[in-house]
Image: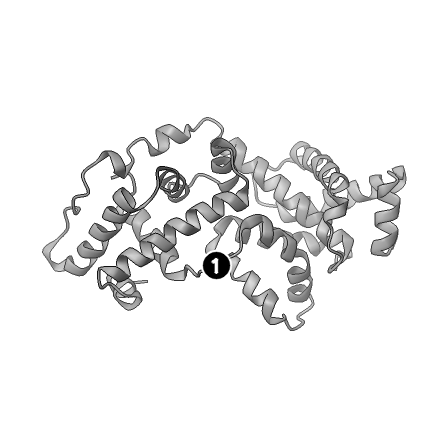
Amino acid sequence: MTERSNEDWLQLLGGTDEMAVAELREFLRRGLRRGLAGWAAADDGFIEDMAQEGTLKVLSGLTTFRGDSRFTTWAVTVAVRVAFTELRRARWKDVSLDRLVEDAPSQQPAAAPAVEPSADSKAAILAEMHRVIATGLTERQRQALVAEFKGMPQAEIAARMGLTRNALYKLTHDARQSLKRGLEAAGIDGDGVREAFDL
Amino acid sequence: MSLSPDELRELAKYVLLTRPDEIGCDDWLGYAPSYAELIATSQPVPEPLQKAAGHLDLCPECAEEFRALMEALKEGGGV
């Protein structure tokens, strides 16, 4: 690949120089092939598609490049996110968010789960977590948090809830903070949680 | 209950790591390239960037993407 400064890349791509665009696409293709090695779904066709999608994403986001790294490092960062978002979407496309969280705690009594008598502290923590999730979170916080810990990818949850990833992160961050405050208010500190869950 | 005990244990782990000043996934994407270059070249990471990289402890997806990015950068002399 032609060695270029960040300024040269920006200038050429800003003018949609065909050779620079082709070199960028090839650079992304090789990077994605290596970065996604081991992913069965990331076959040659997928890598080609993601290199193309990544190139388009980079071209449309040139003004967001901060200039605090090599341009090519930023570009491959963008392409990696594009590729992972697609990989995760493909895996979860048939899973309903509503179905995933339909058994939400808000629809159930906030009862302590059945546990062995020897696990009193763990039972107390689980009961408090149940309580906060059931009564201390907003419906959207609960929906996002449950979906996240059921394994649904962030981008999928965000898309289905009509949020950006940042906004979704804020939503679940607020939920975690509520849980933390709830545990603390119940006299359960970090050491207690670590000990109970062997963390 | 829609979260199993194992899922609640995982949630508890993240609750312990929760800080008031976390950054989101899109914000992290802005820091990732410079952080990756510093890690790849074994250079010291400035404190603000270290703080931003704390996102990787709280977001398995961004951590997964970062590992792939580090691999990708080994290709073609990316750094």
Q: Is residue A72 among the parts visible in the rendering?
A: yes
x and y percentages locating residue A165 in the rendered image: 54, 43
x and y percentages locating residue A106 in the rendered image: 26, 37
Q: Quadrant of the C terminus of chain B?
A: bottom right
Q: Nearer the viewer, residue A102 or A2?
A: A102
Where on the picture, by quarter, is residue A109? top left
Where on the picture, by quarter, is residue A122? bottom left
x and y percentages locating residue B14 in the rendered image: 39, 56
Q: Quadrant of the N terminus of chain B?
A: top left
Indicate whether A87 appears above or below A4: above
Q: From the viewer's perspective, is A65 left or right of A88?
A: right
Residue at x 21% of width, y 36% of height? A108
Q: Amino acid at mark 1?
A: Asp
Residue at x 80% of width, y 44% of height? A24
Identify residue for label 1: B57
Q: Is residue A1 among the parts visible in the rendering?
A: no
x and y percentages locating residue A19 in the rendered image: 89, 40
Indicate whether A155 appears above or below B16: above
- The chain identifier of the residue carrying mark 1 reads B
Mark 1: few/some/many CA within 10 Å (<14, 14-19, 20+): few
Q: From the viewer's perspective, is A83 left or right of B2?
A: right
Q: Nearer the viewer, residue A121 or A1?
A: A121
Residue lying farthest to the left in this orientation: A117
Indicate whether B28 appears above or below B1: below
Residue at x 36% of width, y 28% of height? A99
**Element carrying mark 1:** helix
Residue at x 36% of width, y 57% of height? B15
